[in-house]
Image: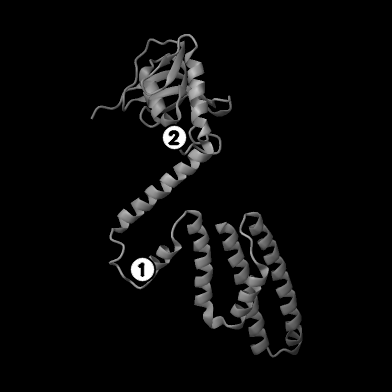
């Protein structure tokens, strides 16, 4: 929606630029030929800009933000006839845009406007917290809001993951950790196990519980034991060099309530086939 509003404002700005150019040509250009052409230029530019705005309005309507053409024209005619009120109209446009965003998030537009005025007037006594505290509070609010929205939309993945792990644990040789990871050896190695700070070299393949592959190492990869998702860190420290395992990692030890990229949805349980090839001990300080 914000993109649509910005695009609309860009088109309106173009209209204003056209109007300014026409006015300059009419008042300062003495060439008779250009003067005779100026009315036609005004008509053509006005019509073409109207077509562009019409297309923009259609796009905004498809995004659930319809524009009332009659009301838009009323405001446009006022603005183009009286440029001294630019600040007022700019504030009105910004206010309407802000109101739509705030109402969507369930935030009071009245309180927002009240404290915006305090800030613009330089009143530093009203907020009652430092800028750092304010940013942290907002971050916490929007993070929790996003998690709630994700849970409503993707909460089904939690039950699906639990069901997949429960089915896997019925198979022979499956081991379950206290944290909820379920894994089974395909091959057992005899080498050393990594600890925090060590680097490991592995090959792996990652899939969703429906079998969709989201990642795979074409060549062995190396990284720190504690530089990966929590489920991987825990799993690697249970393995020995030479081990090949299949592991089901619950969402809270994977990418949690946010997911990752376009393939791993929030609350997704992940399946990994991992082979531990090598352990490089941490450098001693």
Kindly identify the residue that appears in the image at 44 percent across and 19 percent down.
Answer: 182
Q: Which one is in front, 101 or 136?
A: 101
Q: Which one is in front, 6 or 180?
A: 180
Kindly identify the residue that appears in the image at 23 percent across and 30 percent down.
Answer: 285
User: Does residue 25 appear to the left or right of 190 in the view shown?
Assistant: right
Please identify the quadrant where the N terminus is shown.
bottom right
Residue that numbered label 2 is attached to = 256
Q: Position of residue 178 (x, y in %)?
A: 36, 20
Q: Residues within 10 Å of mark 2 (few under 14, many from 20)?
A: some
Quadrant of res 77: bottom right
Q: How is the image coloured?
A: one colour
* Mark 2 element type: loop
Residue sitting farthest toward the left: 285
Res 204 seen here:
no
Up-down relation of residue 262 to residue 61 (above or below): above
Kindly identify the residue that appears in the image at 64 percent across and 64 percent down.
Answer: 67
Up-down relation of residue 219 to residue 62 (above or below): above
Q: Position of residue 40 (x, y in %)?
A: 76, 80
Kindly identify the residue that appears in the image at 42 percent across and 23 percent down.
Answer: 201
Q: CA distance from mark 2 to mark 1?
A: 37 Å
Quadrant of res 71: bottom right
Q: Position of residue 57 (x, y in %)?
A: 66, 62
Q: Residues within 10 Å of mark 1 (few under 14, many from 20)?
A: some
Res 198 seen here:
yes
Quadrant of res 112: bottom left
Residue that numbered label 1 is attached to = 119
Instruction: For the residues labelled 2 and 1, say whether their Cβ atoms are less than 8 Å apart.
Output: no
């Amino acid at each position: 929606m914000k993109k649509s509003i910005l695009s609309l404002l860009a088109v309106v700005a173009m209209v204003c630029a056209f109007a300014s150019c026409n006015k300059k040509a009419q008042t300062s250009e003495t060439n008779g030929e250009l003067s005779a052409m100026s009315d036609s230029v005004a008509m053509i530019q006005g019509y073409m800009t109207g077509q562009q705005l019409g297309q923009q309005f259609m796009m905004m309507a498809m995004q659930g933000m319809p524009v009332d053409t009659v009301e838009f024209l009323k405001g446009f005619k006022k603005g183009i006839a009286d440029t001294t009120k630019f600040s007022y109209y700019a504030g009105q446009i910004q206010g309407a845009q802000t109101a739509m965003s705030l109402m969507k998030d369930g935030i009071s537009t009245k309180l927002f406007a009240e404290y915006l005025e305090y800030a613009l007037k330089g009143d530093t006594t009203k907020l009652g917290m430092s800028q750092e505290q304010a940013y942290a509070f907002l971050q916490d609010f929007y993070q929790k809001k996003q998690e709630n929205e994700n849970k409503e939309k993707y909460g089904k993945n939690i039950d699906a993951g639990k069901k997949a792990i429960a089915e896997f644990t019925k198979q022979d040789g499956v081991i379950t950790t206290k944290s909820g990871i379920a894994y089974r050896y395909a091959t057992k190695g005899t080498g050393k196990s990594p600890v925090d700070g060590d680097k490991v070299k592995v090959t792996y393949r990652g899939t969703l519980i429906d079998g969709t592959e989201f990642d795979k190492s074409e060549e062995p990869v190396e990284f720190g034991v504690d530089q990966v998702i929590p489920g991987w860190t825990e799993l690697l420290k249970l393995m020995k060099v030479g081990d090949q395992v299949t592991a089901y990692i619950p969402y809270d030890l994977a990418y949690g309530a946010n997911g990752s990229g376009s393939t791993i949805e929030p609350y997704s349980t992940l399946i990994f086939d991992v082979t531990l090839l090598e352990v490089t001990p941490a450098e001693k300080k």
